[in-house]
Amino acid sequence: MKLQKKKEDIFNSNFLNKGELIANKYALKSGTTAFVIITIIWILNLVKVFYIDATIMRNCYLACVFIYAVGIVVCTISDLSKHWVKYFLMLWIVVFVTILNTCLTFHAVITYLLAIVYTAMYSSRKMMVYACMLTICSIIISVYGGCYFGVVDENMLHLSARELAIFFIFPRSMICVAFAVVCSRVIKIIKLNVKYAQKMEDLAEKDGMTLLYNKSKYLEMISTAYLQEEKIGVIYWDINYLKKLNDTMGHEDGDKLILTVAESIRKVCNASDDAYRIGGDEFVMIMRDADEKMVAKKIREWKQVLKELGRNSEYPISVSVGYAYGEGKNLDIIIREADRKMYENKRLIHKEQ
Protein backbone atom coordinates (compact mmCIF):
# COMPACT_ATOMS: atom_id res chain seq x y z
CA MET A 1 0.00 0.00 0.00
CA LYS A 2 2.94 2.33 0.71
CA LEU A 3 4.25 1.66 -2.79
CA GLN A 4 0.87 2.44 -4.32
CA LYS A 5 0.71 5.65 -2.26
CA LYS A 6 4.21 6.56 -3.48
CA LYS A 7 3.16 6.00 -7.10
CA GLU A 8 0.01 8.08 -6.58
CA ASP A 9 2.05 10.88 -4.98
CA ILE A 10 4.50 10.88 -7.90
CA PHE A 11 1.62 10.89 -10.38
CA ASN A 12 -0.23 13.68 -8.55
CA SER A 13 2.95 15.78 -8.32
CA ASN A 14 3.66 15.37 -12.03
CA PHE A 15 0.02 16.02 -12.86
CA LEU A 16 -0.08 19.23 -10.82
CA ASN A 17 3.20 20.47 -12.25
CA LYS A 18 1.94 19.84 -15.76
CA GLY A 19 -1.36 21.55 -14.89
CA GLU A 20 0.47 24.63 -13.60
CA LEU A 21 2.60 24.76 -16.74
CA ILE A 22 -0.51 24.66 -18.95
CA ALA A 23 -2.22 27.31 -16.81
CA ASN A 24 0.89 29.55 -16.94
CA LYS A 25 1.05 29.28 -20.73
CA TYR A 26 -2.65 30.11 -20.96
CA ALA A 27 -2.25 33.12 -18.65
CA LEU A 28 0.61 34.37 -20.82
CA LYS A 29 -1.48 33.94 -23.98
CA SER A 30 -4.41 35.67 -22.30
CA GLY A 31 -2.16 38.60 -21.38
CA THR A 32 -1.10 38.82 -25.01
CA THR A 33 -4.73 38.77 -26.12
CA ALA A 34 -5.57 41.52 -23.63
CA PHE A 35 -2.67 43.61 -24.93
CA VAL A 36 -3.89 43.19 -28.51
CA ILE A 37 -7.37 44.36 -27.44
CA ILE A 38 -5.88 47.39 -25.67
CA THR A 39 -3.92 48.17 -28.85
CA ILE A 40 -7.12 48.01 -30.91
CA ILE A 41 -8.87 50.33 -28.44
CA TRP A 42 -5.96 52.78 -28.68
CA ILE A 43 -6.08 52.72 -32.51
CA LEU A 44 -9.86 53.16 -32.56
CA ASN A 45 -9.52 56.08 -30.18
CA LEU A 46 -6.95 57.66 -32.51
CA VAL A 47 -9.41 57.52 -35.41
CA LYS A 48 -12.17 58.95 -33.19
CA VAL A 49 -14.30 55.81 -32.96
CA PHE A 50 -13.94 56.13 -29.18
CA TYR A 51 -13.92 59.45 -27.36
CA ILE A 52 -11.46 58.88 -24.57
CA ASP A 53 -9.12 61.76 -23.77
CA ALA A 54 -6.08 61.30 -26.05
CA THR A 55 -3.54 62.00 -23.30
CA ILE A 56 -5.17 59.56 -20.89
CA MET A 57 -5.41 56.90 -23.57
CA ARG A 58 -1.78 57.41 -24.60
CA ASN A 59 -0.51 57.17 -21.04
CA CYS A 60 -2.62 54.06 -20.48
CA TYR A 61 -1.31 52.40 -23.63
CA LEU A 62 2.35 53.24 -22.98
CA ALA A 63 2.09 51.89 -19.43
CA CYS A 64 0.51 48.68 -20.80
CA VAL A 65 3.29 48.36 -23.42
CA PHE A 66 5.91 48.59 -20.68
CA ILE A 67 4.19 46.08 -18.37
CA TYR A 68 3.54 43.69 -21.26
CA ALA A 69 7.19 43.85 -22.33
CA VAL A 70 8.37 43.14 -18.78
CA GLY A 71 6.09 40.10 -18.56
CA ILE A 72 7.19 38.70 -21.92
CA VAL A 73 10.90 39.14 -21.10
CA VAL A 74 10.57 37.49 -17.68
CA CYS A 75 8.60 34.54 -19.08
CA THR A 76 10.96 34.14 -22.05
CA ILE A 77 14.07 33.80 -19.89
CA SER A 78 12.33 31.72 -17.20
CA ASP A 79 11.09 28.16 -16.96
CA LEU A 80 7.29 28.41 -17.03
CA SER A 81 6.97 25.25 -14.93
CA LYS A 82 8.65 26.91 -11.92
CA HIS A 83 6.44 27.37 -8.86
CA TRP A 84 6.96 31.15 -8.59
CA VAL A 85 5.88 31.88 -12.18
CA LYS A 86 2.16 31.65 -11.44
CA TYR A 87 2.49 34.32 -8.72
CA PHE A 88 4.37 36.61 -11.10
CA LEU A 89 1.79 36.11 -13.85
CA MET A 90 -1.07 36.86 -11.47
CA LEU A 91 0.69 40.05 -10.36
CA TRP A 92 1.32 40.88 -14.04
CA ILE A 93 -2.39 40.53 -14.85
CA VAL A 94 -3.45 42.60 -11.84
CA VAL A 95 -1.02 45.41 -12.80
CA PHE A 96 -2.62 45.41 -16.27
CA VAL A 97 -6.06 45.65 -14.67
CA THR A 98 -4.92 48.42 -12.33
CA ILE A 99 -3.60 50.51 -15.22
CA LEU A 100 -6.83 50.07 -17.18
CA ASN A 101 -9.04 50.90 -14.21
CA THR A 102 -6.91 53.89 -13.23
CA CYS A 103 -6.97 55.39 -16.71
CA LEU A 104 -10.33 54.28 -18.08
CA THR A 105 -12.16 53.98 -14.73
CA PHE A 106 -15.85 53.12 -15.27
CA HIS A 107 -15.19 51.80 -18.81
CA ALA A 108 -13.00 49.01 -17.40
CA VAL A 109 -14.54 48.33 -13.99
CA ILE A 110 -15.55 44.75 -14.91
CA THR A 111 -11.88 43.86 -15.45
CA TYR A 112 -11.38 43.87 -11.69
CA LEU A 113 -12.55 40.25 -11.63
CA LEU A 114 -10.17 39.13 -14.38
CA ALA A 115 -7.40 37.95 -12.02
CA ILE A 116 -9.85 35.90 -9.94
CA VAL A 117 -11.19 34.23 -13.08
CA TYR A 118 -7.65 33.34 -14.18
CA THR A 119 -6.86 31.99 -10.71
CA ALA A 120 -9.49 29.28 -11.21
CA MET A 121 -7.08 27.60 -13.64
CA TYR A 122 -4.70 26.75 -10.79
CA SER A 123 -7.34 25.12 -8.56
CA SER A 124 -5.54 26.54 -5.53
CA ARG A 125 -7.12 28.25 -2.53
CA LYS A 126 -3.80 29.93 -1.79
CA MET A 127 -3.73 31.41 -5.29
CA MET A 128 -7.34 32.54 -4.94
CA VAL A 129 -6.54 34.43 -1.71
CA TYR A 130 -3.43 35.90 -3.36
CA ALA A 131 -5.44 37.12 -6.37
CA CYS A 132 -8.20 38.50 -4.14
CA MET A 133 -5.71 40.53 -2.07
CA LEU A 134 -4.02 41.85 -5.23
CA THR A 135 -7.41 42.79 -6.67
CA ILE A 136 -8.43 44.73 -3.54
CA CYS A 137 -5.10 46.62 -3.73
CA SER A 138 -5.86 47.27 -7.41
CA ILE A 139 -9.30 48.64 -6.51
CA ILE A 140 -7.82 51.04 -3.94
CA ILE A 141 -5.12 52.30 -6.31
CA SER A 142 -7.39 52.66 -9.33
CA VAL A 143 -10.24 54.41 -7.47
CA TYR A 144 -7.97 57.09 -6.04
CA GLY A 145 -5.73 57.20 -9.12
CA GLY A 146 -8.71 57.40 -11.44
CA CYS A 147 -9.95 60.55 -9.73
CA TYR A 148 -6.77 62.36 -10.77
CA PHE A 149 -5.59 60.62 -13.93
CA GLY A 150 -8.52 58.74 -15.48
CA VAL A 151 -11.87 59.07 -17.19
CA VAL A 152 -13.48 59.77 -13.86
CA ASP A 153 -16.98 58.68 -12.88
CA GLU A 154 -18.91 61.92 -12.34
CA ASN A 155 -20.14 60.68 -8.97
CA MET A 156 -16.53 60.67 -7.75
CA LEU A 157 -15.97 64.37 -8.37
CA HIS A 158 -17.96 65.47 -5.34
CA LEU A 159 -16.65 62.89 -2.85
CA SER A 160 -13.85 63.11 -0.30
CA ALA A 161 -11.18 60.42 0.05
CA ARG A 162 -13.13 58.88 2.94
CA GLU A 163 -16.37 58.85 0.95
CA LEU A 164 -14.59 57.28 -2.04
CA ALA A 165 -13.50 54.46 0.25
CA ILE A 166 -17.03 53.98 1.59
CA PHE A 167 -19.00 54.25 -1.65
CA PHE A 168 -16.55 52.83 -4.22
CA ILE A 169 -13.64 50.89 -2.69
CA PHE A 170 -15.63 49.02 -0.02
CA PRO A 171 -18.52 47.76 -2.22
CA ARG A 172 -16.20 46.80 -5.08
CA SER A 173 -13.96 44.95 -2.62
CA MET A 174 -16.97 43.12 -1.19
CA ILE A 175 -18.06 42.10 -4.68
CA CYS A 176 -14.52 40.90 -5.34
CA VAL A 177 -14.49 38.79 -2.16
CA ALA A 178 -17.96 37.37 -2.88
CA PHE A 179 -16.91 36.46 -6.41
CA ALA A 180 -13.74 34.82 -5.08
CA VAL A 181 -15.80 32.75 -2.60
CA VAL A 182 -18.14 31.59 -5.38
CA CYS A 183 -15.17 30.69 -7.59
CA SER A 184 -13.57 28.77 -4.72
CA ARG A 185 -16.75 26.73 -4.25
CA VAL A 186 -16.97 26.01 -7.96
CA ILE A 187 -13.30 24.96 -8.01
CA LYS A 188 -13.87 22.68 -5.01
CA ILE A 189 -16.82 20.99 -6.72
CA ILE A 190 -14.82 20.55 -9.92
CA LYS A 191 -11.89 19.04 -7.98
CA LEU A 192 -14.24 16.64 -6.19
CA ASN A 193 -15.75 15.59 -9.51
CA VAL A 194 -12.29 15.09 -11.03
CA LYS A 195 -11.17 13.12 -7.96
CA TYR A 196 -14.28 10.95 -8.18
CA ALA A 197 -13.71 10.38 -11.91
CA GLN A 198 -10.08 9.44 -11.25
CA LYS A 199 -11.17 7.05 -8.51
CA MET A 200 -13.66 5.41 -10.84
CA GLU A 201 -10.99 5.11 -13.52
CA ASP A 202 -8.57 3.63 -10.99
CA LEU A 203 -11.16 1.11 -9.85
CA ALA A 204 -11.79 0.16 -13.48
CA GLU A 205 -8.07 -0.64 -13.84
CA LYS A 206 -7.73 -2.63 -10.60
CA ASP A 207 -8.58 -6.17 -9.67
CA GLY A 208 -11.22 -5.85 -6.98
CA MET A 209 -9.79 -8.64 -4.82
CA THR A 210 -6.01 -8.08 -4.86
CA LEU A 211 -5.95 -4.38 -5.88
CA LEU A 212 -3.29 -5.22 -8.46
CA TYR A 213 -3.91 -4.01 -12.00
CA ASN A 214 -6.41 -6.17 -13.88
CA LYS A 215 -6.21 -7.97 -17.21
CA SER A 216 -7.83 -5.14 -19.16
CA LYS A 217 -5.13 -2.74 -18.01
CA TYR A 218 -2.50 -5.37 -18.79
CA LEU A 219 -3.72 -5.84 -22.35
CA GLU A 220 -3.82 -2.08 -22.86
CA MET A 221 -0.27 -1.55 -21.59
CA ILE A 222 1.39 -4.39 -23.48
CA SER A 223 -0.07 -3.09 -26.72
CA THR A 224 1.00 0.54 -26.16
CA ALA A 225 3.31 1.92 -23.46
CA TYR A 226 5.66 -1.04 -22.89
CA LEU A 227 6.50 -1.31 -26.57
CA GLN A 228 8.38 1.99 -26.28
CA GLU A 229 10.69 0.76 -23.51
CA GLU A 230 14.32 0.14 -24.45
CA LYS A 231 14.75 -2.69 -21.91
CA ILE A 232 11.99 -4.62 -20.21
CA GLY A 233 11.59 -7.64 -17.94
CA VAL A 234 8.57 -9.92 -17.53
CA ILE A 235 7.85 -12.27 -14.61
CA TYR A 236 4.97 -14.78 -14.69
CA TRP A 237 3.48 -16.52 -11.65
CA ASP A 238 0.90 -19.27 -11.35
CA ILE A 239 -0.34 -20.68 -8.03
CA ASN A 240 -0.05 -24.44 -7.76
CA TYR A 241 -2.80 -26.70 -6.37
CA LEU A 242 -5.31 -23.88 -5.95
CA LYS A 243 -8.19 -26.02 -7.21
CA LYS A 244 -7.27 -28.80 -4.80
CA LEU A 245 -7.23 -26.30 -1.93
CA ASN A 246 -10.63 -24.92 -2.97
CA ASP A 247 -12.09 -28.43 -3.15
CA THR A 248 -10.68 -29.63 0.19
CA MET A 249 -10.53 -26.49 2.36
CA GLY A 250 -13.07 -24.23 0.67
CA HIS A 251 -12.94 -21.14 -1.50
CA GLU A 252 -12.34 -18.86 1.47
CA ASP A 253 -8.95 -20.46 2.06
CA GLY A 254 -8.31 -20.37 -1.68
CA ASP A 255 -8.94 -16.63 -1.63
CA LYS A 256 -6.54 -16.23 1.30
CA LEU A 257 -3.86 -18.00 -0.73
CA ILE A 258 -4.44 -15.71 -3.70
CA LEU A 259 -4.21 -12.65 -1.44
CA THR A 260 -1.00 -13.92 0.16
CA VAL A 261 0.68 -14.41 -3.22
CA ALA A 262 -0.59 -11.03 -4.42
CA GLU A 263 0.83 -9.39 -1.29
CA SER A 264 4.22 -11.03 -1.85
CA ILE A 265 4.30 -9.61 -5.38
CA ARG A 266 3.17 -6.19 -4.25
CA LYS A 267 5.88 -6.03 -1.56
CA VAL A 268 8.68 -6.35 -4.15
CA CYS A 269 7.07 -4.03 -6.67
CA ASN A 270 8.81 -0.66 -6.94
CA ALA A 271 7.99 2.58 -8.80
CA SER A 272 9.26 1.24 -12.16
CA ASP A 273 7.30 -2.03 -11.92
CA ASP A 274 3.65 -2.81 -12.63
CA ALA A 275 1.96 -5.91 -11.21
CA TYR A 276 -1.17 -7.48 -12.70
CA ARG A 277 -3.61 -10.25 -11.88
CA ILE A 278 -4.49 -11.63 -15.31
CA GLY A 279 -6.36 -14.74 -14.22
CA GLY A 280 -7.75 -16.47 -11.16
CA ASP A 281 -4.32 -17.66 -10.02
CA GLU A 282 -2.05 -15.99 -12.60
CA PHE A 283 0.04 -12.88 -12.04
CA VAL A 284 2.45 -10.85 -14.16
CA MET A 285 5.00 -8.18 -13.33
CA ILE A 286 6.36 -5.87 -16.02
CA MET A 287 9.70 -4.25 -15.10
CA ARG A 288 10.86 -1.17 -16.97
CA ASP A 289 14.55 -0.67 -17.76
CA ALA A 290 15.36 -4.18 -16.51
CA ASP A 291 18.01 -6.70 -17.53
CA GLU A 292 18.52 -10.36 -16.59
CA LYS A 293 20.39 -9.55 -13.40
CA MET A 294 17.65 -7.23 -12.16
CA VAL A 295 14.87 -9.69 -13.00
CA ALA A 296 16.69 -12.57 -11.28
CA LYS A 297 17.25 -10.42 -8.20
CA LYS A 298 13.57 -9.49 -8.13
CA ILE A 299 12.59 -13.17 -8.12
CA ARG A 300 15.02 -13.91 -5.27
CA GLU A 301 13.51 -11.06 -3.24
CA TRP A 302 10.01 -12.29 -4.00
CA LYS A 303 10.81 -15.86 -2.90
CA GLN A 304 12.13 -14.56 0.42
CA VAL A 305 9.02 -12.42 0.97
CA LEU A 306 6.71 -15.32 0.09
CA LYS A 307 8.63 -17.58 2.49
CA GLU A 308 8.15 -15.09 5.32
CA LEU A 309 4.44 -14.67 4.55
CA GLY A 310 4.01 -18.42 4.32
CA ARG A 311 5.28 -19.08 7.84
CA ASN A 312 1.87 -18.30 9.29
CA SER A 313 -0.01 -20.26 6.63
CA GLU A 314 -2.01 -23.37 7.59
CA TYR A 315 -0.99 -25.07 4.35
CA PRO A 316 2.10 -25.06 2.13
CA ILE A 317 2.27 -22.36 -0.53
CA SER A 318 3.55 -23.42 -3.92
CA VAL A 319 3.91 -20.98 -6.83
CA SER A 320 5.43 -21.54 -10.26
CA VAL A 321 7.46 -18.68 -11.72
CA GLY A 322 9.11 -17.89 -15.04
CA TYR A 323 10.81 -14.84 -16.47
CA ALA A 324 12.31 -13.30 -19.60
CA TYR A 325 13.78 -9.98 -20.63
CA GLY A 326 14.70 -8.01 -23.75
CA GLU A 327 13.75 -4.94 -25.79
CA GLY A 328 10.28 -3.48 -25.49
CA LYS A 329 9.61 -3.82 -29.19
CA ASN A 330 9.93 -7.62 -28.75
CA LEU A 331 7.51 -7.71 -25.81
CA ASP A 332 5.27 -10.36 -27.35
CA ILE A 333 8.22 -12.75 -27.65
CA ILE A 334 9.39 -11.92 -24.11
CA ILE A 335 5.94 -12.62 -22.67
CA ARG A 336 5.70 -15.99 -24.43
CA GLU A 337 9.17 -16.93 -23.18
CA ALA A 338 8.32 -16.00 -19.57
CA ASP A 339 5.07 -17.96 -19.83
CA ARG A 340 6.92 -20.98 -21.25
CA LYS A 341 9.48 -20.92 -18.41
CA MET A 342 6.73 -20.65 -15.85
CA TYR A 343 5.08 -23.83 -17.19
CA GLU A 344 8.46 -25.58 -17.22
CA ASN A 345 8.83 -24.66 -13.56
CA LYS A 346 5.30 -25.95 -12.87
CA ARG A 347 6.03 -29.31 -14.51
CA LEU A 348 9.23 -29.62 -12.48
CA ILE A 349 7.39 -28.89 -9.23
CA HIS A 350 4.66 -31.44 -10.00
CA LYS A 351 7.27 -34.03 -10.98
CA GLU A 352 9.18 -33.56 -7.73
CA GLN A 353 6.02 -33.94 -5.70
Image: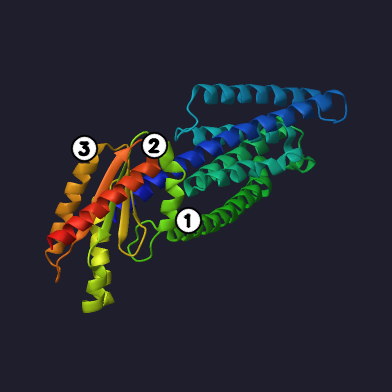
Residue 252 lies, in percent from the top left, at: 27, 75
Mark 1 or mark 3: whose residue is earlier in sequence: 1
Residue 266 in sight: no
Relative to 84, does residue 210 appear above or below in the rendering? Answer: below
Mark 2 or mark 1: whose residue is earlier in sequence: 1
Residue 3 in sight: yes
| Badge nearest the viewer, 1 or 3 | 3
Q: Residue at x 46, y 46 (%)?
A: 223
- Cα distance, mark 2 to mark 1? 26 Å
Q: Helix, strand, or loop for circle 3?
A: helix
* Horizontal arrangement in the rendering, residue 145 relative to residue 200 (left or right): right
Q: Where the N terminus falls, by quadrant?
A: bottom left
Relative to 151, does residue 131 appear above or below in the rendering? Answer: below
Q: Residues within 10 Å of mark 2 (few under 14, many from 20)?
A: some
The numbered dot on residue 229 is 2
Image colouring: rainbow
Spot the residue most to the front: 351
Q: Amino acid at mark 2?
A: Glu
Q: Residues within 10 Å of mark 1 (few under 14, many from 20)?
A: few
Q: Helix, strand, or loop for circle 2?
A: loop
The numbered dot on residue 293 is 3
Q: Residue at x 11, y 64 (%)?
A: 311
Q: Residue at x 50, y 30 (%)?
A: 80
> What residue does disc 1 label?
198
- Cα distance, mark 3 to mark 2? 17 Å
- Cα distance, mark 1 to mark 3? 36 Å
Residue 228 lies, in percent from the top left, at: 43, 37
Q: Amino acid at mark 3?
A: Lys
Relative to 342, does residue 313 appear above or below in the rendering? Answer: below
